[in-house]
């Protein structure tokens, strides 16, 4: 099939997914398109790279300078998001007050800019990280949180996966890469490398599987059939892409998250507090075994990986040996900059820019203080997820799947990094919702004609007996 015809077919296919998934009765704010755009960009490539207008990030100096076009795009989305949240002040305030550890962590990241060797660059990166939190808050303060998260996952997945297959099959210069050593084909799709392709399959694939399970257990109807078709297509695309991406970390974490969704859906016992603790600990021990336990080496070999986890253990030793102040680190997102980055590049044939471990990444940038704050977020978030199984088990199981997947993913990849989809959905998972329902301005939002500007309508009082929802 000629590429032009294939492009038309895939475009019609994407349009068909949106049409089939449409629910006329569901209402969400138009502002939801802001986090959708944020995720579409961060789940694929920077705008400057798509347009081939930005500088090549092939030197430490170019990385310090960044891309003016991308800075403009992200600043515009962040500004739009802040305007939306300004019109939802009461809801946002209630959410922030309920998530003290998360706020303290972001505040500490901002303070760490002061001891960075490149404070201006560190501050710009911190500003982008605030954008991740802003996007999460836009979804969680939507008049219907459940529908908002469903549409966020659907709108993003409907675009990223078909386009990845289109690029891989018909536009090889974009969708495929080659290993510089042996010339092996690497499938990247809309992303820039195979691990990034695996990561978006993990994140949005779990969302599609969760949605499929949710629809499958609902009452039979024409709408149910349409939704089952759309989610089945997305899950099938995800499995195909995971198969060719050869990203074992993403595949393993997808299996962990999927098993949690299935088990907690069909076994009431698994939703009990003690059983949840057992499941999470058991799955995390399985994920940790190749890294920390000798018996895990056989599991690593079974999936075609060497005991060094494809050289990761060597990278960890190198990075830890170059770490700065063990207490406070080198400053927010400042480790992979300047002379330190150049020294690492001189040791490898490729441009290494991450430690392939989310916990080590936090340590070298923020020190033990950052690790302690991340641990506080994990503990508080997990406690809220488990308790939410009593209030809203449907979304609780999705939150738990993202929580475990992100914790396991970060053992061999950088999961806790700004503007990464796995980090953004980890924030979704650990952000606690107050037990007393956040006041909604439903009438105002349903009537809004332009998402960026708040109206003057007053808030609608919430029902005290209505449970909190994710």
Image (cartoon, helix red, strand yellow):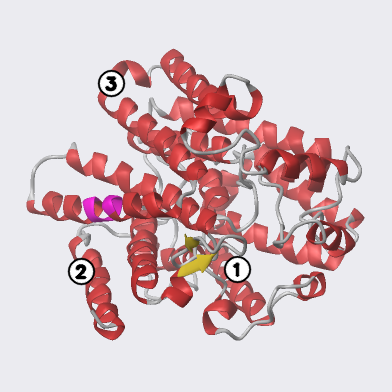
**Which residue is located at x 50 percent, y 27 percent?**
299
Which residue is labeled 1 in the image?
Answer: 78
Q: Which mark is residue 267?
A: 3
**Which residue is located at x 42 percent, y 15 percent?**
275
Cα–Cα span, label 1 and label 3 = 41 Å
In the picture, residue 143 is in which quadrant?
Answer: bottom left
Q: Quick one: label 1 or label 2, which is nearer the N terminus?
A: 2
Q: Quadrant of the C terminus?
A: top left
User: Magenta stretch: dominant SS?
Assistant: helix
Which span of residues is magenta-colored? Answer: 232-236
Residue positioned most to the top: 274
In this picture, residue 66 sits left or right of residue 452: right
Q: Quick one: label 1 or label 3, which is nearer the N terminus?
A: 1
Whether residue 235 appears in magenta in the rendering, the answer is yes
**Which residue is located at x 46 percent, y 25 percent?**
387
Q: Which mark is residue 16?
A: 2
Is 264 placed above or below 186 here?
A: above
Q: Residues within 10 Å of mark 2 (few under 14, many from 20)?
A: some
Do the numbered discs 1 and 3 sit on residues whose CB atoms are within 8 Å? no
- How many dots with numbers? 3
Whether residue 89 appears in magenta in the rendering, the answer is no
Q: Which mark is residue 128?
A: none
Residue 402 rendering spot, x and y as whole percentages: 47, 40
| Nearest-to-viewer mark from 1 and 2 | 2
Q: Residues within 10 Å of mark 1 (few under 14, many from 20)?
A: many
Say what secondary structure mark 2 lies in.
helix
Q: Quadrant of the N terminus?
A: bottom left
In the picture, residue 462 is in which quadrant?
Answer: top left
Do the numbered discs 1 and 2 sit on residues whose CB atoms are within 8 Å? no
Say what secondary structure mark 3 lies in.
loop
**Which residue is located at x 57 percent, y 84 percent?**
52
């Amino acid at each position: 099939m000629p590429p032009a015809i294939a492009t038309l077919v895939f475009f019609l296919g994407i349009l068909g997914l949106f049409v089939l998934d449409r629910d006329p009765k569901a209402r969400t704010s138009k502002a939801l398109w802001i986090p959708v755009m944020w995720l579409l960009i961060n789940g694929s490539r920077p705008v400057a790279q798509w347009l081939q207008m930005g500088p090549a990030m092939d030197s430490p100096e170019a990385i310090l300078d960044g891309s003016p076009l991308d800075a403009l795009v992200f600043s515009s989305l962040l500004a739009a998001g802040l305007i939306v949240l300004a019109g939802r002040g009461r809801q946002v305030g209630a959410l922030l007050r309920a998530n003290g550890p998360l706020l303290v962590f972001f505040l500490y990241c901002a303070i760490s800019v002061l001891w960075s060797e490149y404070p201006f660059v560190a501050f710009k990166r911190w500003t982008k990280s605030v954008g991740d939190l802003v996007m999460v808050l836009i979804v969680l303060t939507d008049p219907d949180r459940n529908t908002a998260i469903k549409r966020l996952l659907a709108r993003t997945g409907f675009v990223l996966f078909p386009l990845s297959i289109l690029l891989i099959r018909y536009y090889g210069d974009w969708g495929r890469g080659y290993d510089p050593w042996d010339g092996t084909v690497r499938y990247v799709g809309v992303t820039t490398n195979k691990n990034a392709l695996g990561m978006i399959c993990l994140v949005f694939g779990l969302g599609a599987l969760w949605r499929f399970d949710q629809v499958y257990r609902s009452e039979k109807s024409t709408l149910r059939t349409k939704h089952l078709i759309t989610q089945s297509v997305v899950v099938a695309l995800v499995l195909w892409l995971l198969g060719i991406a050869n990203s074992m970390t993403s595949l393993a974490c997808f299996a962990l998250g999927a098993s949690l969704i299935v088990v907690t859906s069909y076994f009431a016992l698994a939703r009990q507090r003690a059983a949840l603790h057992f499941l999470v600990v058991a799955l995390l021990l399985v994920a940790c075994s190749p890294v920390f336990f000798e018996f895990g080496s056989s599991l690593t070999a079974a999936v075609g990986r060497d005991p060094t986890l494809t050289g990761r253990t060597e990278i960890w030793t190198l990075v830890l040996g170059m770490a700065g102040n063990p207490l406070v680190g080198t400053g927010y997102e400042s480790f992979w900059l300047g002379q330190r980055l150049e020294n690492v590049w001189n040791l490898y044939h490729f441009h290494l820019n991450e430690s392939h471990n989310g916990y080590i990444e936090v340590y070298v940038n923020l020190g033990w203080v950052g690790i302690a704050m991340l641990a506080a977020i994990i503990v508080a978030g997990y406690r809220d997820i488990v308790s939410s199984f009593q209030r809203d088990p449907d979304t609780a199981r999705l939150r738990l799947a993202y929580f475990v997947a992100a914790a396991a993913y970060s053992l061999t990849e950088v999961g806790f990094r700004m503007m990464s989809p796995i980090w953004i959905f980890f924030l979704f998972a650990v952000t606690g919702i107050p037990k007393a329902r956040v006041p909604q301005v439903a009438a105002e939002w349903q009537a809004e004609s332009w998402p960026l500007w708040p109206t003057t309508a007053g808030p609608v009082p919430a029902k005290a007996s209505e449970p909190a929802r994710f």
